[in-house]
Every structure is written in C-alpha cells, then in structure tokens.
Image (cartoon, rainbow, N blue to C red):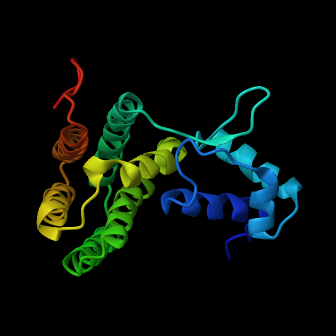
C-alpha cells in the first residue's frame, strides 16, 4: 500500500491543479492568508507546500516580495522540449531492449484511452492521458534517475502546454489525430524491440511537435 500523502503534499497537488485550471494564473501573486482560507488550512503546511512547489519551479519568490505562480517563457519551453526529447528517447531505448508483453499491453491500453477521449472531444482528458502515456514509458525504462529528472520538470511543462495558445483548441481533427498518429509510430518502435529505432522515433516526435507548435526551429546540434 502506498504511503498516505502528508497535508503539505496534498496542498501542493491541489495548487498544481488550480494552476492547470487557470484558477492560479502564471505571474499571479500568491497571498498566503487567502490561499490558506480557501483550502481551510493553517499557513504552516501551506508554506511547506509552497516551498516544495518553489523547488519544482512552479512558484517564484524574490527577496522581500510575495511568491508568484511561475511564468515560462517560450525560450525556456524550448529548452524543456530538448531535455524531454533526450530523456524520453533514452527511456524508449531502455524499454525497447527489455519490454515485457504486460508493459506493451499497458501502453496500448493507455493509447486506447487517448483515442476514446479525443474522439469524444474531451480535450483536457486526452491531453492528460497522452502525458501519462509518456510517463509510463519513463517509468518502464527501469532507470529511477531518468524518471526523477523527467518528473522534476513535468508539472512545469504541462502548465505551459495547457496555457500556451499554440497548444489550445479542441478539434480532434486538428490535434488529436496528430497525437494518435505519433503514438502509432512510438508503439510500433517499441514493439519492434529495436533500441535505436525507439530512441530516434521518440526524440523525433517530441522535437518535431514541440518546436513546430512553438513556431521555433530546433537549435543547431540537436539530432533529428
């Protein structure tokens, strides 16, 4: 049985959801008294939660000023795309060399959830399911340090994706089909058990989709 989350951990998770929902907007000043009253807690555990979110880059704090919800610039987002492509490419390489039928079935089931949500037009749901697909790959890689690195920036990446205009829009034809086609390629590479192909395919998909939606060109020296 998984250990029960502490109050600060629970508060941190609730604040992340509020950020993703737009209830706490990027750059917004965080008033501790108001937030404590909103969640019905004292300021002690709230401060611990804010400190944890600060460590994840989700909260920014300057000397003598109230903390604020982090803002991610397009340049920072581009850097995160490169890091994500690198980490997931390696995760795919490791997984392709050791994937079990059970692991592949789990990924295929997650792909089916994305398809169902996308066809129904449930945009937030299929985007969350898509992100979970990539998290499953990192978890199945068997490398705990790779997973930690991926998770350390995951909330920040997702907040940017949810709030950036280039990643919005609910049409399945405009967004969902591209995601599903990408997943077909990613799953095929993993099923083939070819580490080189799996790493290259994951890296290609993440770099292409990330930089295309940002309207930027990948920096020189990044392999396609």
Q: Is residue 86 above or below residue 152?
A: above
Residue 151 versus residue 48: which sits nearer the camera? 48
Give the number of marks.
0
Picture quarter with the C terminus: top left
Image quadrant where residue 169 sits:
bottom left
x, y percent for residue 98: 32, 56
Residue 172 versus residue 1: which sits nearer the camera? 172
x, y percent for residue 38: 74, 67
Residue at (49% x, 59% y) in the render:
20
Q: Is residue 114 above or below residue 24?
A: below
Residue at (71% x, 65% y) in the render:
10
Whether residue 83 appears in this view of the structure is yes
Residue 199 versus residue 195: which sits nearer the camera? 199
Residue at (37% x, 28% y) in the render:
75
Residue at (51% x, 38% y) in the render:
71
Picture quarter with the N terminus: bottom right
Image quadrant where residue 102 sits:
bottom left
x, y percent for residue 135: 41, 57
């Amino acid at each position: 049985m998984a250990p029960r989350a502490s109050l600060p951990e629970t508060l941190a998770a609730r604040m992340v959801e509020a950020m993703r929902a737009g209830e706490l907007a990027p750059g917004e000043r965080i008033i501790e008294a108001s937030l404590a009253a909103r969640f019905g807690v004292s300021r002690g555990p709230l401060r611990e939660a804010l400190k944890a979110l600060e460590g994840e880059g989700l909260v920014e704090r300057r000397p003598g000023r109230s903390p604020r919800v982090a803002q991610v610039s397009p340049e920072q987002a581009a850097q995160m795309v490169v890091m994500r492509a690198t980490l997931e490419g390696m995760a795919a390489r490791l997984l392709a060399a050791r994937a079990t039928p059970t692991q592949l079935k789990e990924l295929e089931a997650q792909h089916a959830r994305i398809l169902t949500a996308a066809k129904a037009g449930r945009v937030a749901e299929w985007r969350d399911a898509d992100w979970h697909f990539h998290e499953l790959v990192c978890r199945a890689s068997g490398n705990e340090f790779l997973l930690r690195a991926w998770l350390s920036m995951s909330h920040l990446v997702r907040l940017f994706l949810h709030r950036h205009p280039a990643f919005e829009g609910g049409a399945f034809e405009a967004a969902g089909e591209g995601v599903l086609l990408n997943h077909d390629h990613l799953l095929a590479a993993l099923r083939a058990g070819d580490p080189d192909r799996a790493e290259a395919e994951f890296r290609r998909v993440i770099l292409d989709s990330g930089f295309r939606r940002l309207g930027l060109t990948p920096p020189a020296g990044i392999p396609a």
